[in-house]
Amino acid sequence: MSPAGGGGGHTEKEPSGWQIDTLKEYVESLINAADTRYEQRFLAQEKAVREALAAQEKAVTAALTAAEKAVAVAERNAEARRKGANEWRGSMTDRERNFVSRPEFESLKERLDRAEGVGKGIRDVWAWIITAITAIAAVAVFFIK
């Protein structure tokens, strides 16, 4: 029963059945199984990355489409605001065109002041005339009685 006694990796009582060739086949089968697993994992990861990229591309396309629509709506709204502002500006210009200028206003004011002064003067003269006639009539009534 010597451990170094001959026999290719087994004891004399129990032969293990392992030989260099069987050990080589076993290790090769482990390596091949690992290679198969790694290849399956790689293919699954590659498929997942492709699917993720496709989903991302769809999301980016949808986002760009939504952004383009939003820009178009914003441009239409801005154009409508510009058009409204131009209409408002035009109506203000028309309104201002109907206003009297400062020199015209001053000239008109002078004329009205003069006309008012003349009218007041005429009214004052009439008031004096009526007062005088009334006084003369009162004196005449006093002397006639």
Image (cartoon, grey):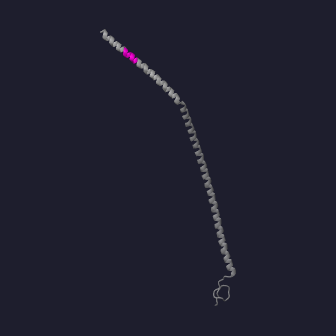
- Residue 100 appears anywhere in the view: no
Q: Residue 97 vs residue 129: left or right?
A: right
Q: Residue 138 vs residue 88: left or right?
A: left
Residue pushed farthest top?
Answer: 144
Residue pushed farthest right?
Answer: 21
Q: Which image quadrant: the C terminus? A: top left
Examine the image and state in which quarter residue 31 appears. bottom right
Point out residue 36 in the picture as x, y percentages from the top left corner. 66, 70
Q: Which residues are magenta?
A: 126-132
* For residue 67, above or below residue 113: below
Residue pushed farthest left?
Answer: 145
Q: Which image quadrant: the N terminus? A: bottom right
Q: Nearer the viewer, residue 81 or 120?
A: 120
Examine the image and state in which quarter residue 97 appears. top right
Q: Main secondary structure of the magenta part?
A: helix
Query: Who's the residue at 67% across and 79% down the image?
Result: 23
Query: Who's the residue at 59% across and 47% down the image?
Result: 71
Query: Who's the residue at 59% across and 44% down the image?
Result: 75
Point out residue 66 in the picture as x, y percentages from the top left corner. 59, 50
- Residue 106 appears anywhere in the view: yes
Point out residue 136 in the picture as x, y percentages from the top left corner. 35, 13
Query: Who's the residue at 69% across and 81% down the image?
Result: 20
Number of numbered discs present?
0
Point out residue 18 in the picture as x, y percentages from the top left corner. 66, 82
Q: Nearer the viewer, residue 73 or 53?
A: 73
Asked whether 130 falls inside the magenta stretch, the response is: yes
Asked whether 112 falls inside the magenta stretch, the response is: no
* For residue 76, above or below residue 110: below
